[in-house]
Amino acid sequence: MLKLPKINSLANQTAELMRESITSGEWLRQLPSERILCKKFLVSRNTLRHALRKLHAEKLILTKPGSGTRILKKNHRPAPPPIDVGLLSPEPLERLRPTQTLWIDELRALLSERGCRMHLFHGQQYFGRNPGTELRRLVAENPLGCWILTLSNAAIQKWFAANNVRCVVAGSVHAGLKLPSCDLDHRATCRHAAGVFLGLGHRKLALLLAQSQLAGAFESEAGFIEGVKRSPQGEAEALVCYHDGTNAGVSASLRQLMNLDAPPTAMLVASSYHYLTAAGCLDQMGRRVPQDISLISRDDDLFLSYVIPTPARYRVGAHMLAKSLLKPILALLENRTPRLLAHRLMPEFVPGESLSRIATSRHRACALAHGLSA
C-alpha cells in the first residue's frame, strides 16, 4: 500500500511556531493577545485557537478568562538578551508635534545602525491615573530591552520605576523618581525668557501653560517665576495662566488675562501650537504683536518660520536630541548604568519680530490716545 505523506495542518504549524517562540524565550511569562498572534502568524482566530488548544493539552500554557494566556513550562535554552526598544506615547506618531516625530525618526535611524529596532506603541490607557494593569500586560507581551517614555505623567513613571523595567524618559522626570532621562532644560529656558522680557522693559509678564501632569510643565512655571523674582526690578510681576489645551480654552484664558486692569505686556507661550492660537486670538481682540504685546514661544516647530511677525522661540536640533537619548538607551541594553541620569539640553534662543521694547509700545499707545482725544 502506498503511504501518503502526513499533512501538517495550519493549526499544527502555528502551534509549532508558538512552541519554538516559547522555547527560545521570545515570550517569558505570557503570550501576546490573540489579535497580535493572528497578525504575527498570518492566521485566522479559529486556526489560532486550535493551535492554543494543542499547546494547552501539552500543558505548555494555561488560559484564564480575563487574565490572558500564561506560559507554564520554563524555557529549555537561555534566551538572548533583547536588543529592540519600544517607544510608548499617548498619541499615534501622526498626531504628535512635527519636532517630536523628527527626533523619533532620527532615533529610530540611529538604533537601526546598531542593529536595534524601534517598536511604536500608543494609547491613552497607558497614561491614566492607574495604568498598572495595562502596562503589565503590554510589557509582558512585548519583552524588549528598553522602553522610551514620551509625554509621560507621574503614574507611568512610578510604575516603570517600581517594577524595575528598563526605560529612558524622553522628557523630565517627576520629583522623587530616579530614571534616566533626556529633555530640554525648560526651567532654564523659561528663566531666560523672563530675562529677555525684563531686558526689553516689560514688567507685567505672563506664562500661558497647558494643564498637564508633565514634569516639564512644573519646571517651566518654576523657571519663569524664578526669572522674575531674581530680577532687580522690584515692580516686576509674573502671572501663570493655565488652559485645557483646546482652542476655546486658550482663547478663554487669554481673554481673562487681557481683560485685567493692568494686562501683561509680554507673554511666554509653552507650545508652538498654542502660540498660533494665542496670536490669532490677540488679533481678534485688536491687540497687535509686538506693538501691544510681545510674545515668545517656548517650543519650536518648522511652521513657526512662516508666521508673521516671525515668533521669537527656542530651538534645538532633532538629531542632537536623538543622540542624547541614544546614550542611556545603549547603556541599558548593555546592562550598564547610564553615566548621566538626567541630561538637559539648553536650546538656542532665536530672536524674532514678535518682540519689542515696552517704551515703544507705550509711546504708540499714548500717541493713539492723543489722536483719539484730538
Image (cartoon, grey):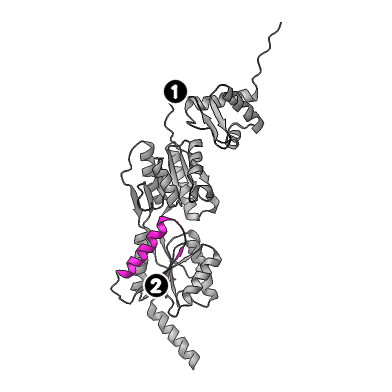
Q: 357 left or right of 75?
A: left
Q: Position of residue 244 (x, y in %)?
A: 51, 63
Q: Position of residue 149 (x, y in %)?
A: 44, 47
Q: Which mark is residue 208?
A: none
Say what secondary structure mark 2 lies in: strand
Q: Position of residue 256 (x, y in %)?
A: 49, 73
Q: Which mark is residue 205?
A: 2
What residue type is disc 1 on?
Arg
**Residue 158 belongs to magenta span:** no
CA distance separating discs 2 and 1 = 64 Å
367 vs 267, nearest the viewer: 267
Q: Position of residue 191 (x, y in %)?
A: 34, 64
Magenta residues, start to end: 205-229
**Residue 207 belongs to magenta span:** yes
Q: Residues within 10 Å of mark 2 (few under 14, many from 20)?
A: many
Q: Which mark is residue 77?
A: 1
What residue type is disc 2 on?
Leu
Q: Is residue 363 above or below residue 336?
A: below
Of helix, strand and loop, which mostly describes the magenta segment? helix
Instruction: Give whichever of discs 2 and 1 has the lower sequence position.
Output: 1
73 vs 222, nearest the viewer: 73
